[in-house]
Image: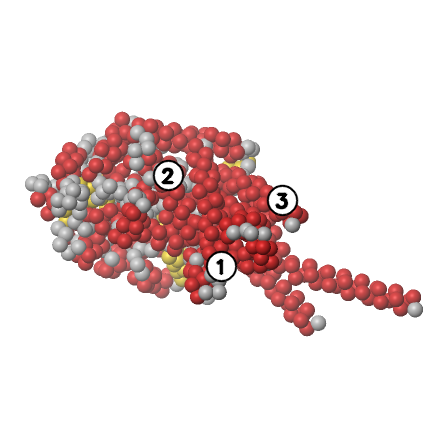
Amino acid sequence: MQASFLRIEVLMNKKKRNCQLSAYGYITPILLIMIVFLGVSVLMSVVLSFTKYNILTPPQFNELDNYTRMLTDKKFVKALMNTLKVMVYIVPLQTVISLLVSVVIASKRNTWLGKLANIVIFIPVLSSNAVVGTVWKAILNGHIEVVEKFFAFFGINCSMLLGDADSALLTVAMVSIWKNVGYYAVLYISALINISDHYYEAAKVDGAGRISRFFYVTLPMLKPTTILVVFLGVTTSLQCFDIIYNLTGGGPAMGTTTLVFYVYDLCFKSGRAGYAMAVSNMLFLLILITVVAQRKMMRKDASEI
Amino acid sequence: MKRKSISVILCVAMVAGLAAGCGSSKDEKKDGKEILSVWIPPLDDETEKNYVPLLDKFEKENNCELDVQIIPWDTYEEKYMTAINAGEGPDVGYMYVEMFPTYIDSGAVVDMEEYLTEEDYEEYLYLDRGKMMGGTYGFPFNTGNPFIMYYNEDILESIGETAPETWEDFERICKKATKDTDGDGKIDQYGYAAGFNNGDMSPLYLLNSYYYSLLWQNGSDIYNDDLKSVRFNDEAGVEAVEYLKSLTPYMPEDYMSLAATDAFSNVFGGGHAAFACARAMQAQSESFQETYPDLHWNYVTSLKNEQYGTFGAADCLTLMSACENKELGMKLIKYMTGTEVMSEYHKEHHGAPMTKDEEYQGDEKLERTLTEDRDKWRPLQAGPCGSDILLNLVSQIQAVMSGDASAQEALDEAAEYSNDLLDEYWADKE
């Protein structure tokens, strides 16, 4: 009897081992892709950031030169400031707009208008950044009477928006929000749908009005989604490139040059790939800090719930 | 079991695909024929159809196969750098002057002097413009379209002026031409249709259009002759930028957000400006005939201050060091730029003749730029750290034009940045 139990146990262990092995087999391809295209490239970027390298000739070790250069590089500082400004412009506004849009759409989700709005807000998300940049440039600089009148209503001369360093950066941020708000709104909508009606009914019984219900029920229940939206917003705004490339080309006078754009120029226009990698590692560090902070907050939030 | 086997096969196939994808794909020979890869940017809207078939004869005569790749302008440099780094670059490639220094330094391009004969120097008209950094690294392929100052004959006539010759003439006419013509209180006719947003073009296009001409006309240049430092912030250089800035009251109000190409095609083309600077190209003459048939335009190749001077690109073909059969590569370059191919190509897509035997087939009006005015334009000096220096310079000039910096401050800052780069470059050389 005991022998047969042992045999069964051995067989089960063998099956378990086989299952584990096949599981490893299944993840091997994606693991290889991750190691080759992510792990190795990050590692190479770190190693090459300590070299003088122009892509065409073998790299030469130059200690910490690239990192010390960053401290005195006015263009790096300008690009860093622009990146942080873009982030500050985008994240709060994008989060608030996507939240408000999602609340409106979720409340009308069973009407045809709600369904249509749900589709319409997602169209810019599906468009490529290159198309978005080109289209908005044509809209803003095209001297289209309707567009000019629309902006003039708010006292804005739209044809000047891309010509001034400050307004160009703000314009880039607004276009980016227009492009991405649909994505975050969809995240919020799915979270809103998952909030049980019981909470709202209980709040109603307690005499809470619409606004109170929003602030004391909806917002707290959306906290995990808000954390996700904020941190995704931070990481994507830190990497803003395509829209800028197509809308302003980084100008005028470096007014819209962000870190990613600066890295691109350094690497492919100036042939200073070693320094470009040092700058991109700084960006990587910024994003890493953001991701770690997000994970910590999400974990804390989950434990609170 | 069957399902598991299929899964395993799929996984293995994926890994194999990944490994294959990372492998080299460069064909060396096909059916015993030598393969030469050629990279060029789009020369017109349909280069594949218009230019590439003209090379068929070369393949037959030399028992080789040409792999011609048309690479879009916006990823041109990027593709070159990454491909050469991976050993997948072309045998013969098209490069513009700003690209050359990095490739010359790294030994990726060949000094073609030893492959050129006296007959070549007699036959090919612009070979001198392929000499740079102590060697002949470029074989001019697309040149002869200098940036010229177009003017609207009707506007000049209406204000009693004729074609400008000097900076003073130009400024005076700009001032007279800038006005409200329909009496609604808004300026609707401008002196100079200029735009300082690079739009779809590289930022360097702004220097080509508006800056080099003034810099050279005032007697300055980008580099000093030894290429060890820059000189664009000398007195003449500062004066040139100040002069450009002084013209802003005569430009459209949105000149900072207006693309240079749009300023030319829409503002000048639409008959709303006295002057605009753009390439001398037959295409522009034709496009005006289609879009603005009433526009009566003419041009001066260059204004004069201290001297004449305007920018004319000298985009070249170059022989890459990786080319195994350099004689064949060189033969191809000469064929691609030779009379037979170019005469045929220029029938439909007008351009400057590259050889002595090629007849000019373009707009008669523009022929002067290649004959009596040929010495009024020239290409850029090829110098170390070229792209870096010029990209920084253009952003400083944008700062001046938008009023964020004075000419002296901006140029000094650009010069300091450039000289630091050059010091480092030359220190490495020593």
Contact between labelled residues 2 and 3, with CB atoms less than 8 Å apart: no
- Label 3 vs 2, first from the N-terminus: 2
| Tag 2 residue | A166
Measuring 49% from the left and 48% from the top, which residue is drawn there?
A95
Q: Which residue position holds label 1?
A: A107
Q: Position of residue A232 (x, y in %)?
A: 53, 49
Check disc 3 and give the amino acid type: Lys
**Of pointers 1 and 2, the one earlier in the residue sequence:** 1
Chain name for mark 2:
A
Most distant residue in the left direction: B160
Q: Residues within 10 Å of mark 2 (few under 14, many from 20)?
A: some
Q: Residues within 10 Å of mark 3 (few under 14, many from 20)?
A: few
Of residues B420 and B238, which is closer to you in this image? B238
- Judge the density around disc 1: few (<14), some (14-19), many (≥20) Cα neighbours within 10 Å: few
Q: Quadrant of residue B8?
A: bottom right
Secondary element type, mark 3 = helix
